[in-house]
Amino acid sequence: MIPQQVIEAKRDGLELSSADLEQFLVAYQAEEVAEEQMAAMLMAMYFRGLSPLELATLTDVMLHSGRRLDFTHLPGPCVDKHSTGGVGDKVSLILAPVVAELGAFVPMMSGRALGHTGGTLDKLESMEGFRTRMPLSQFREVVEKVGCAMIGQTPEIAPLDGRLYALRNVTGTVASIPLISASIMSKKLAEGLSGLVLDVKVGEGAFLPDKRDALILAQTMVALGAQRGLPVSALLTAMDRPLGIAVGNGLEVAEALECLRGGGPPELRELTVHLAAEMAAVCGLEADRAVARRRATAALTSGAALQRFARMVEAQGGPRGLDTGAEPCAAAPVCGEAPAERGGVIQRVRPRILGFGLISLGGGRTRRKQAIDPRVGFEILVRPGEAVERGQPLARVHVASNTDLERAREMVREAIVIGSEAPDPPPYPLVLDRVDSSGQGHETSSL
Ligand code: URA
């Protein structure tokens, strides 16, 4: 195989044979195809897309580049959720213990912040001592003992995806339906699950803001799972605004904990309960979603999910006593309000501006492996459609210094758009659509 010939064929819009694509990918893994050649191939794939055969080959080669976990010895189904990435999305932290309470095992493998979006691993690490890296044997032990555990992608799981993901992040090739689909599904197929739920974000804060693109992404991933024997369903959910109030790693952990203590923002609780019911259905635990939703709500209000979360955090080296009121994370040294400069109606709360704002305050990365400040972020106190008066606080900003305070206030003023009328178009419903293996989008009315 001559790598540049394969790249040229893809560049020119020809379909690569399975053999050629597999050889190219395996050679890259063996360092026989250079980074710059793979970068060129990814860009060709980004522009040309992938045929169904190419998509299947890419997914399978990434899946088989590492180990596959096996949880068949556990006395219950194994299920996970994966989000395509958003701002303020701390659902995983609440969802895993809730679903474990319903009777499933949740071996969650999560990612770090990507682009303007946050990552569950960074949130977890804002709790002092919490280990997101551990040998797979230990991960399996925590899942077995507690019912849920959360780690990062290990070098054993789809390592080819790990390398390609890092390369895509710095070559402008993330926002591609087939590349995202193969990346997510190769990792999830390696987890040895009985079911998977995808939270596909729609709106300005998503990698693919357009609803049609999000629907195709959901259908592509659901089909990849079904073809390989994994039941998958997807919810398309609103990311035209941040989810909940907190944006920033430590603040988001605190908000997740509030939710586990029976409070928290209603949208966050509602989405968690929806996803929990979907997970219970997809892994065969509870087909009646209304029953599962009631049980998930009870797990939150009774404190049972909180206790399980506290046990998981302790088992992974994090702070003790989260179920008896301990604070999970350190606070930022400076906190101030950002007041409205005029009265009116909130038109939009723009997640991308807040996501990039968080990075610029030190709460995200501009370089790989850069340390981040988990204490900084925003608490957004208003929602689209809400009326505000001049001087009313729109947000609380948590920053590292007085110099950052004014910068953060400016970000809030740019992100929160105030007008005179009700927002047009109106904000998205929290859950826009559902996709299952029939491949169809099912509007929310049928949920
Ligand atoms: N999440 C992933 O795991 N992969 C992508 O490509 C994008 C989001």
Image: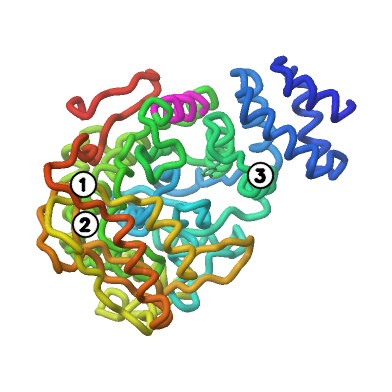
Left or right of 163? Residue 136 is left
Residue at the image position 44 percent from the left and 36 percent from the top: 208
Q: Earlier in the sequence, mark 3 or mark 1?
A: 3
Name the quadrant of the N terminus: top right
Residue 379 % position (x, y): 28, 66
Q: Main secondary structure of the magenta part?
A: helix
Disc 3/disc 1 C-alpha distance (Å): 33 Å
Q: How is the image coloured?
A: rainbow
Q: Is residue 221 magenta?
A: yes
Amino acid under label 2? Ala
Residue on which disc 1 sits: 347
314 in relation to 252, above or below? below
Residue 383 % position (x, y): 19, 53
Residue on which disc 3 sits: 171
Q: Is residue 200 magenta?
A: no
Read off the magenta span.
Answer: 215-224
Q: Secondary structure at mark 3?
A: loop
Residue at the image position 39 percent from the left and 65 percent from the top: 248
Q: Pointers 2 and 3 in contact (CB under 8 A)? A: no
205 in relation to 88, above or below? above
